[in-house]
Amino acid sequence: MVKSQTQSFSMTALPLLERQNTARIAGPAPQPSLAPFHTNESSANTIAYLALIDELQNKMTALLSERDALLGTVETLEHGVKEAARLQQDSMSLLPTVDGAKLDLLYQPLDGVSGDAFDVKDLGEGQVGIGIIDASDHGVPAAILTSSLLTALRIAQDALATDETKSSGDVLDAVQAQLATMDLSECEFAAGLHAVYDSNTQVLRFARAGVPYPIRIAADGSVTALVSDGPIMGAIDDASFETTTVKLNPGDTVVFATDGLEALLAMDSEDSDSPERALASWFENHGQTPVAALLSRLRKRLRETDRSAWHADDVTAISLHIPG
């Protein structure tokens, strides 16, 4: 039985030993080969990638086309604003020559078009009318408002020239009535002033609506404010505007200005709590320098001052000088 078991063992073990020896001689079993990089699936990805690139290129082309269209629109708008500014300035009167008085102007829009407007008219018989409008904003909406209000002012000023019962207060009443008919959400209010100077009597009559008080510069350089009650137009229903009468003297100069000039000169004021004093203080500090020269100096300063350095606004100032 022992022989039988040994024989049986040898016969059973031999195939196993042979397999092991054969494995040692042949070396390690070969590893399965890796799939090549380019497969059918990678080709599909490449096609999708190229399609995406093509789509992005098409979108980029469309965006560039839109950009060019927008640039064209901007250029058209800029041209339109420049043309509007030219027409606006052309529509305002040149300062007339008046016997017995000399007029000078400072007019500097902040942007292309202005929220300030003025009209100076020879009323005949030695009289001159001076009107100023200042919208509560600047830019295109303000320019639209002032254009309409200036038309109303001119119509009322023409009526004043032929009707002795009319006054500067009536002119501002007409402007306020026009403002009430308009609906501009960005420009609901407007300041203004109207004055009539009679060179025969050297009498100035004026009414104001929210603009700075006119300042009177005497021949000796002293400065006083000409006070007249009058709220900003559009703020109070049925507001009235007081017409004030002032007798001027030879050598006097009166300066009418919008609050843009007041804001600029507030940079020089030591009393920051009273910006309304800035206008009078600045002219007072410059003594007996002719106002025409001062306005020229201010024009240069406005062009050179960075708009971030002050409460930038449109600026209008008209001076009336009585030779002495």
Image (tube, rainbow, N blue to C red):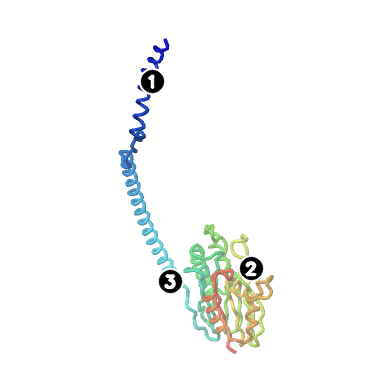
Give neighbour class at mark 2: few <14, some 14-19, many 20+ (Cα, 10 Å).
many
Q: Position of residue 227 (x, y in %)?
A: 66, 74
Q: Give the amino acid type for the residue marked by disc 2 in the picture.
A: Gly
Residue lying at the far front of the rendered structure: 3
Within 10 Å of disc 1 (Cα), the crowding (few <14, some 14-19, many 20+) is few
Vertical arrangement, residue 128 with respect to residue 87, above or below: below
Residue reaching furthest bottom? 324
Placement of the C terminus among the 4 image quadrants:
bottom right
- The foreground one among 59 and 173 is 59
42 relative position to 269: left or right: left
Q: Is residue 247 above or below residue 168?
A: below
Tag 1, which secondary structure?
helix
Disc 3 to disc 2, C-alpha distance: 32 Å
Q: Are marks 3 and 1 in contact (CB under 8 Å)?
A: no
Q: Position of residue 41 (x, y in %)?
A: 33, 38
Q: Quadrant of the N terminus?
A: top left
Q: Which residue bears the numbered disc 2?
A: 230
Q: Nearer the N terminus, badge 3 or badge 2?
A: 3
Is label 2 or label 1 in front?
1
Disc assigned to residue 97: none
Q: Circle 3 sits in a helix, a strand or a loop, which is it? A: helix
* Tag 3 residue: 86
Q: State which quadrant residue 210 falls in.
A: bottom right
Q: Amino acid at mark 1?
A: Ala
Q: CA distance from mark 2 to mark 1?
A: 125 Å
- Res 13 label: 1
Dot 3 or dot 1, earlier in sequence: 1
